[in-house]
Image (cartoon, rainbow, N blue to C red):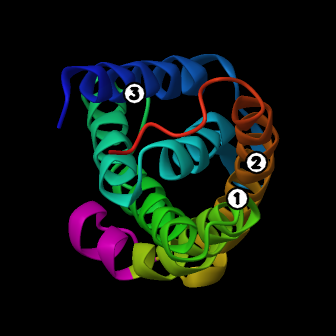
Amino acid sequence: MTTRKMVIMTMFVAIAVAGSTFVYFPAGIARAYPIQHAVNVIAAVMLGPIPAVIIAFLTGLIRILTGTGSLLAFPGGMIGALLAGILYKYFGKTWLAAVGEMVGTGIIASLLAVPYAKILMGTTATAFFFMPPFLVSSISGALLGLVLVARLQRTQIKQLSV
């Protein structure tokens, strides 16, 4: 991994952490933080699946340590980032990266959040408790990420993966 790539990953983490502090909106019983999902899509396209997962992990960790996120930040961010990166890597379509973020976070992570929340957080919520806010957040963020990555691809910053 090059120094340039690590610096860009760090900048994405900073954008996601700062963005989740300032940009959020109510989504039913929870709040939607679309910047994390937008960063996941951009990182998946520009850097690949593993760096995107690392960015999502570090963002979740910092948000938990600073009290601005819950333990649900881990499955919520990392699964979407991984699926977005894998779909883009194998099919080369940016819209599939956005779909991967929506499905990975909005559906898969919300289902995995049920046992995860029960074991680690002592919650007895069902999948229908987590799915609506996860879907609202991931869909809005993935669409924002899709627009931003399309704009970035028109510039000199095509792709940073080695």
Which residue was labeled with disc 3? Answer: 13
Residue 130 picture location, percent across and down: 59, 69
Tell me the kind of residue under disc 1. Answer: Thr
Q: Where 123 falls versus 39 (above or below)?
A: below
**Of pointers 2 and 3, the one earlier in the residue sequence:** 3
Q: Which residues are magenta?
A: 115-124
Residue 136 picture location, percent across and down: 77, 57
Name which residue lies at 39% across and 59% down.
49
Which residue was labeled with disc 2? Answer: 146
Q: Quadrant of residue 7?
A: top left
Which residue was labeled with disc 1? Answer: 94
Q: Nearer the viewer, residue 87 or 145?
A: 87
Mark 2 near mark 1, Cβ–Cβ under 8 Å?
yes
Report the Cα–Cα distance between label 2 and label 1. 7 Å
Q: Where 156 falls versus 150 (above or below)?
A: above
- The C terminus is located in which quarter? top left
Name which residue lies at 54% across and 82% down.
126
Residue 120 falls inside the magenta stretch: yes
In the displayed structure, does residue 81 sit left or right of residue 54? Answer: right
Residue 118 picture location, percent across and down: 32, 75
Report the Cα–Cα distance between label 1 and label 3. 21 Å
Q: Nearer the viewer, residue 56 or 92?
A: 92
Q: Quadrant of residue 152?
A: top right
Tell me the kind of residue under disc 3. Answer: Val
Q: Nearer the viewer, residue 123 or 108?
A: 108
* Mark 1 or 3, closer to the camera: 1
**Of pointers 1 and 3, the one earlier in the residue sequence:** 3
